[in-house]
């Protein structure tokens, strides 16, 4: 069955920093994988595993963003971090309830995650791209970034 993605990556989602864009693409892919598993009515274990991967990767991604913010003394760091903490708390709570079978991964949850991800990237994350670039962060690297390498390693064992 060919399933249309819940979120399609496009240049509107780019923050202008290749490493961060690659990480955002991974988040989009994981969200689409979770959506596909729900649509195909996969086993709960499959859904749990994808959700766990999405949560883990989100935490790592937020740590990368926040590290860059501290390195470059980003003025909206505290506010941005609050957004990250709020989502992390919500998603960890949902994951706990899904594991305990108190809740299921529903379209409402997927729509919430889609909306949060796209709005967060297109609003909050778009602010730091130009700021980091002005302070000397390279927008693109001559070799593939670590996020792509880790993702490749995880999925091509």
Image (cartoon, rainbow, N blue to C red):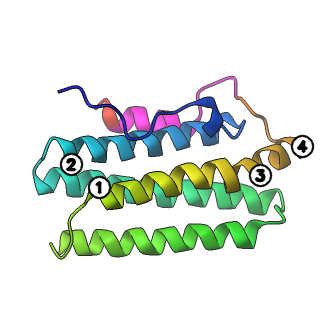
CA–CA distance between discs 1 and 2? 8 Å
Residue 36 vertical placement versus 100 (above, below) = above
Q: Are marks 1 and 2 in contact (CB under 8 Å)?
A: yes
Residue 154 vertical placement versus 114 (above, below) = above
Instruction: Specify the segment rendered in magenta.
Output: 141-154
Q: Quadrant of the N terminus?
A: top left
Instruction: Identify residue for label 1.
Output: 107
Marking on residue 134 = 4
Label 4 environment density (alpha carbons within 10 Å; few <14, some 14–19, many ≥20):
few
In the rendered image, residue 31, in percent from the top left (x then y), is placed at 38, 47
Q: Nearer the viewer, mark 1 or mark 3?
A: 1
Disc 2 is placed on an element classified as helix
Instruction: Identify residue for label 2.
Output: 38
Q: Earlier in the sequence, mark 4 or mark 2?
A: 2
CA–CA distance between discs 1 and 3? 29 Å
Instruction: Identify residue for label 3.
Output: 127
Q: Nearer the viewer, mark 1 or mark 2?
A: 1
The reply to whether residue 61 is visible in this rendering is yes
Q: Outermost residue, left direction?
A: 43
Disc 1 is placed on an element classified as helix
CA–CA distance between discs 4 and 1? 40 Å
In this rendering, position of residue 60 left or right of residue 29: right
Disc 3 is placed on an element classified as helix
């Amino acid at each position: 069955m060919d399933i249309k993605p819940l979120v399609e990556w496009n240049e509107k989602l780019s923050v202008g920093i290749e490493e961060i864009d690659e990480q955002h693409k991974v988040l989009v892919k994981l969200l689409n994988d979770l959506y596909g598993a729900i649509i195909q009515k996969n086993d709960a274990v499959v859904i749990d595993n994808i959700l766990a991967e999405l949560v883990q990767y989100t935490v790592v991604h937020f740590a990368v963003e926040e590290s860059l913010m501290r390195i470059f003394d980003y003025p909206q760091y505290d506010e941005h971090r609050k957004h990250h903490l709020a989502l992390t708390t919500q998603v960890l709570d949902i994951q706990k309830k899904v594991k305990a079978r108190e809740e299921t991964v529903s379209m409402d949850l997927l729509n919430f995650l889609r909306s949060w991800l796209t709005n967060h990237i297109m609003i909050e994350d778009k602010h730091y791209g130009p700021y980091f670039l002005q302070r000397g962060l390279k927008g693109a690297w001559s070799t593939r970034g670590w996020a792509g390498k880790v993702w490749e390693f995880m999925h091509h064992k």
